[in-house]
Image (cartoon, rainbow, N blue to C red):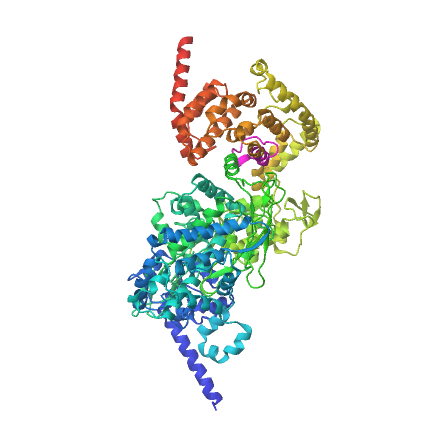
Amino acid sequence: MLSPLLIGLSLVLLTVHTLRQALTSPLNKIPGPWYAKFTSLVLKWHEFRTNRTRYIHDLHLQYGPSVRIAPSEVAFASAAAVKEIYCSGGSGYDKTEFYNLFKVYGRRTMFTTLNKDDHAKRKRILADRYANTNIVRPQSLDGIAERAGNFVNRCFQTNSTIVLGLHSYAFDCVTHHLFHPHATDSLLSSKDEEIMREVTFDDSLQNRLLQFYWPTGHKLFGKILYLFAKPRETPLADGFVLDTCAQTDAAPFTLLNRLQGPDYNLDNLDIAAECLDHMAAGIDTTGDALCFLMWELSQPASIRYQKKLQDELLANPGASFDRLPYLDAIVMEGLRCFPAIPMSLPRYVPPGGRTIDDFFVPGGTTVSCQAYSVQKMDQTVFPDPNTFKPERWLDQPNKGDAERKRLFFAFANGGRGCVGKHLALAEMKMLLQAVYSRFTTLPDATMRPEELEMSDQLISSRPAGQRCLLQTPESSSSSVNARHRLSPGLPYVSASLPQLTLSLASPFKSSPSVCSARPLANRRNVPSVKVTFTLIQQTALKRSTTVNTAIMASLVNVRRDESDPFYRYKMERIQTKIEGKGNGIKTVIINLTSVAQSLARPGSYLIKYFGFELGAQTNLDPADDRWIINGAHEAVKLQELLDGFISKFVLCKKCKNPETDVHIKDGRITLDCKACGQRCDVDLRLKLSGFMLKNVPKKTKLDKAERRAARKAKQNGKGEENGSGGDDNSDMASPNGDDNGIESDDDALTRKIKTEAQILENKAVEIKDDDWAVDMSEEAVKARQQQLPGEFKQKLVLNGEDEDEDVEGGGNTVYDQLGTWIQEQTEQKGGVVNVDDIDIYVKAKELGIESKHRTVLVLVQTIFDENICAQIGKRAPMLKRMITSERHEKAFLGGTERLVGQLSEEGTDMYDKVVKILQLYYHHDLITEELTIKWGSKASKKYVDLATSKKVRKAAEPFIKWLQEAEEESDDDDE
Ligand code: HEM
């Protein structure tokens, strides 16, 4: 029996030893939380709670790129550390025993070899099967293309229940590469699908962690443990691989064919183990990477990227997947934001120790980098790192390209980086190509963002909600293009589009969830098909993946529980920047002003709220718009806190609408809802309420302006229409009252238009009268517009153009509606030439925008296409009546710039037609000398980017010169 004295003494000695080690460790110089010196329990706690990656990332944000995370473990997140740990000597430092957990049939595979030599031996045998030259062989690519086709085609099968899925796709692709002609067909066969599920549906994390950290306990209590945490069991997959590896006729490009080569001396079990390992490595990684990328592309903030991708695909039908730069940028950015393996890849520092990131690290220390942090920490290379921006891979290709690539760690780096990289990229690109050439995807309304949060597994993560549902409104090439030209930057899919619902569901643990893709009311006569299928977006067993897609989009619904992509109230997603180090570390909220504006609340309320919630100091009234919270706080966290702020201080308690005014009076705070009229009290016990009571904002000039305007309107009884196109009663008149040209040209068209328009006019006037009652005078509207939060303001200003532009009734959606309508008519009538001028005019009239200059901007982009030169003459009479001022003329030329730029980008070089177009415009009196010369003298980024604008001006030079000369000549003549 051990005496209590002995036990006590042992404990004391152990404590002294631990303390001594902790206090004298050379790792003490590395920043990190204090407890990391003494214990790894906190880290383990996070591992068991599936939260390791985010925990380490938070520590990086707090302590910088080098962080001690446990007594003998350090995490790094710099390019220099990646190079040292994973690339030095070719394949970097040796792997730790952690990789023993991945042994297959008790054998070591290439992935599980711990030291360099063993690894090199195995890699020499099989590396060439994964070389790009082998992947792009027709036999290899054909297999992938066929499966991508299966994936898409199955969506249209009538009256059938088809089990599809990204994991199935990845499974079938990887087995094709490993075993062809013995690959699986899980997209088509439920038997094969069962195997895939077994490999990917797994809940053995806790069991396997215990096996790693406490092997004796695991052996002793394995059976009891089984009741709480299941071990990994894959009998179907084992059987499939063992059987398949017994075949001897695998195609030459396959891995099996290579491993069976006579020179390598691998027994059957070694071969099967290697193959099973690659099979598992290739399913969840590629499947989840695709899932997260498609989810992100479907978000409102990323729909424009989806659109650009579609444009590229439609402009290059049949192009090889590796010849599409935008597709490449999308995939790179997807893997940067959502690395399929976001977690630490642990390695041992070699004996003698090494210097990593200027810190000496003794031999035997576990060091690692995680892609999640490496790809986000350095904001000089990846500015705004939490936002999904494919353009960063295209911007200035020569500048920063090397840095970006150095920090790209999704496939790890060095000799032990992902051997399946080229295969994975081919699979991803070919699937995206197949899907986005035909579909537009949007998130399903039932999805909640938190379902796509990271849930860490052994080395990878998976979506916490374990499902991903998308919808696809049908899209055709013409509709996509026409709509895009209308208003780049706006969601081009309007809610009124016919819907074909394509649901991507994931059954995960329990029974397969079958989701239906069905056509809804479809005005375009899409055949009525009932398609039911399941897209499996599965869990990870071995190395699955996932990343928090919620943090990527830059615009979010003000109510994040509202998943409708067309929800009116949007705000920028919170963006932060961590500055300083140690005690001086602070979080700058880069876009607080914009977010506060979107919520119509002072920035000081928001920052103070964050301060209260986090128990951190904040600054309240920064002169330089730098809103700071002391300490390091991740944007995701702040976004969550903001939800609380919105629910307590913004949303109407009755109708949950965010359009509320705050009234502070007599010690009460009330929210006055503009939508339902409800007035509700804010809870005065909240800390921020106290602050608000003490800090009532002063009335601004704008408040006064609006009140003055309202008074004036009341006195007048009615107001004047704002906008530049003249009032509605003189819809065909020029702004100067100079009707000459119009009257003299009063042909049948004009008369018809006027008659048709008359009917609508009466209605429009009626509506206006109502509007005047709520004060629509220019002054009042402008004042109100200024009062609106940022996002609401934008609704009234197409593309957020000039602030000094007048407000135009209806907002951009009206213009969008006109464009969409023309485009639908184009489709219905089999070409834009068949869409009648009168119908267009009447439609514009119906929308109340027939006299607006922006209508001209929309028209030029929808009624013309690459055959514009032949089309101008036919449209000239209508356009002439609609271009009624300089502003209209400018919009007309601006729209033309957009059209030329867009079509050229799509592959039809329009620049050499610019002179002809301008000549025709001039000939038909659609443009004037003076304004065109002025327009030609200076590029502008009002309608297109500067480079396009310059190109158009350059192309227009001969015409402008001709105009100038003609003008000079006529001046001379006058003299
Ligand atoms: C988007 C898809 C993929 C990603 C992001 C990915 C990522 C990675 C990463 C980060 C590693 C290094 C792991 C470590 O050091 O612990 C790795 C290794 C590996 N991957 Fe992938 N992988 C993907 C797809 C695939 C596919 C399709 C296969 C193939 C069949 C594959 C096979 C392997 C193998 C065999 C290794 C071990 C390499 C070695 O130790 O030399 N991976 N992968």
- Residue 105 seen by the camera: yes
Q: How many marks?
A: 0
Q: Is residue 353 left or right of residue 333?
A: left
- Residue 333 seen by the camera: no
Q: Residue at x 46, y 68 (%)?
A: 239
Instruction: Provide residue 538's location: percent of width, then percent of height.
Output: 51, 60
Q: Looking at the picture, does residue 891 appear above or below residue 362? A: above
Q: Residue furthest bottom?
A: 1
Instruction: Provide residue 207's location: percent of width, then percent of height.
Output: 49, 72
Instruction: Provide residue 504's location: percent of width, then percent of height.
Output: 55, 53
Instruction: Provide residue 906's location: percent of width, then percent of height.
Output: 44, 36
The one nearer the camera, 463 or 500, is 500
User: What residue range appears in magenta?
Assistant: 796-820
Q: Is residue 593 left or right of residue 259?
A: right
Figure quadrant of the C terminus: top left
Quarter of the rendering containing residue 946: top left
Q: Is residue 818 magenta?
A: yes
Please state the quadrant of the image where ligand 1 appears.
Answer: bottom left
Q: Looking at the picture, does residue 398 appear above or below residue 582? A: above
Quarter of the rendering containing residue 279: bottom left
Q: Looking at the picture, does residue 131 appear above or below residue 913? A: below
The one nearer the camera, 682 or 353, is 353
Q: Residue at x 32, y 58 (%)?
A: 128
Q: Is residue 300 magenta?
A: no
The one nearer the camera, 318 or 755, is 318
